[in-house]
């Protein structure tokens, strides 16, 4: 529990916690409290902090909303935010650099709370990954792969059964992110991301295995 003076020191509030990381540099910190002001009403407060890290020192705002049950203000959001970049395996980036770009944009959209947009982005990133992967496997079929729907590409050109089965299911969930009615009611964007990550992992393992075997003949 923390007590803060707001509105130029005229009022005091109790907050259940203060931020333990900077939303701009994404480092764990003990932020410096500057001031706080009521927003539209007394139950909504914006609290200004600064990051103490010498490499950052940026200001950010914690929006806090009063919780009647506890009698304290709870953090609702931290702004501005600079989400971390989504890590992508080097072997996969070499196959499909555009996958890494689109996936990271979807990842950041999700971090900003834009889940509906992020789902579509994840679906698009997967299509780039699979088509680039298949093109690398079948360079002579480049134009055919580009033109075909992604489901047909998976069936016709993905020979690795682990990649095929995970990619198929990821596309199923990805399609739900673009359709009015969801087919897979019990699944959501977390499951889509997990299937994409597993697909990426299988592709990475395949690439690494081929390189090691080629180097050690």
Image (cartoon, rainbow, N blue to C red):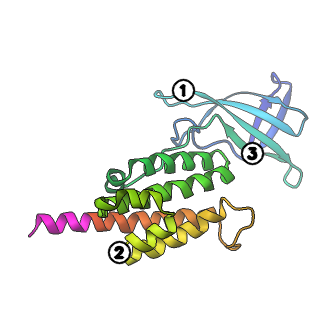
Badge 3 element = strand
Above or below residue 113? Residue 205 is below
Q: For the magenta stretch, what is the residue range?
A: 208-217
As measured in the structure, the alpha-carbon distance from the residue carrying label 2 to the one carrying label 3 is 47 Å
- Whether the residues at callouts 1 and 2 have beta carbons within 8 Å, the answer is no
- Whether the residues at callouts 2 and 3 have beta carbons within 8 Å, the answer is no
Q: Where, by quadrant of the figure, is residue 43 drawn?
A: top right
Q: Position of residue 115 (x, y in %)?
A: 66, 53
Residue at the image point whose x is 51% and y is 41% from the top: 27
Camera-side residue of 217 and 67: 217
Q: Which residue is mark 1?
A: 57
Residue at the image point whose x is 36% and y is 51% from the top: 93
Give the side of residue 17 with respect to residue 65, left or right: left
Q: Position of residue 211 (x, y in %)?
A: 20, 63
Camera-side residue of 31 and 132: 132
Q: Which of the labelled discs sits on residue 76, or is there none?
A: 3
As measured in the structure, the alpha-carbon distance from the residue carrying label 1 to the one carrying label 3 is 22 Å
Q: Which residue is mark 2?
A: 159
Above or below residue 210? Residue 125 is above
As measured in the structure, the alpha-carbon distance from the residue carrying label 1 to the one carrying label 2 is 51 Å
Q: Reading the chain from its start, which is encountered first: label 2 or label 3?
A: 3
**In this view, the mark in front (2 or 3):** 2
Q: Residue 127: say if magenta.
A: no
Q: Where, by quadrant of the figure, is residue 141 drawn?
A: bottom left
Magenta-colored segment: predominant secondary structure: helix
């Amino acid at each position: 529990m923390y007590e803060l003076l707001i509105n130029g020191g005229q009022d005091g509030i109790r907050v259940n916690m203060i931020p333990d990381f900077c939303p701009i540099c994404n480092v764990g910190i003990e932020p410096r409290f500057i001031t706080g002001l009521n927003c539209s009403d007394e139950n909504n407060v914006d609290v200004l902090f600064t990051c103490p890290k010498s490499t950052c020192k940026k200001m950010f705002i914690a929006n806090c909303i009063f919780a009647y049950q506890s009698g304290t203000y709870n953090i609702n959001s931290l702004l501005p935010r600079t989400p971390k970049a989504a890590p992508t395996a080097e072997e996969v980036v070499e196959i499909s650099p555009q996958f890494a770009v689109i996936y990271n944009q979807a990842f950041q959209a999700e971090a900003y709370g834009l889940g509906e947009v992020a789902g579509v982005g994840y679906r698009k990133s997967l299509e780039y990954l699979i088509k680039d992967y298949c093109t690398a496997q079948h360079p002579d079929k480049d134009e055919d792969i580009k033109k075909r729907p992604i489901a047909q590409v998976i069936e016709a050109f993905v020979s690795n059964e682990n990649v095929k089965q995970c990619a198929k299911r990821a596309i199923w969930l990805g399609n739900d992110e673009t359709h009015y009615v969801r087919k897979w009611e019990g699944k959501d964007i977390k499951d889509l991301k997990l299937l994409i990550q597993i697909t990426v992992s299988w592709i990475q393992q395949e690439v690494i295995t081929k390189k090691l075997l080629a180097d050690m003949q």
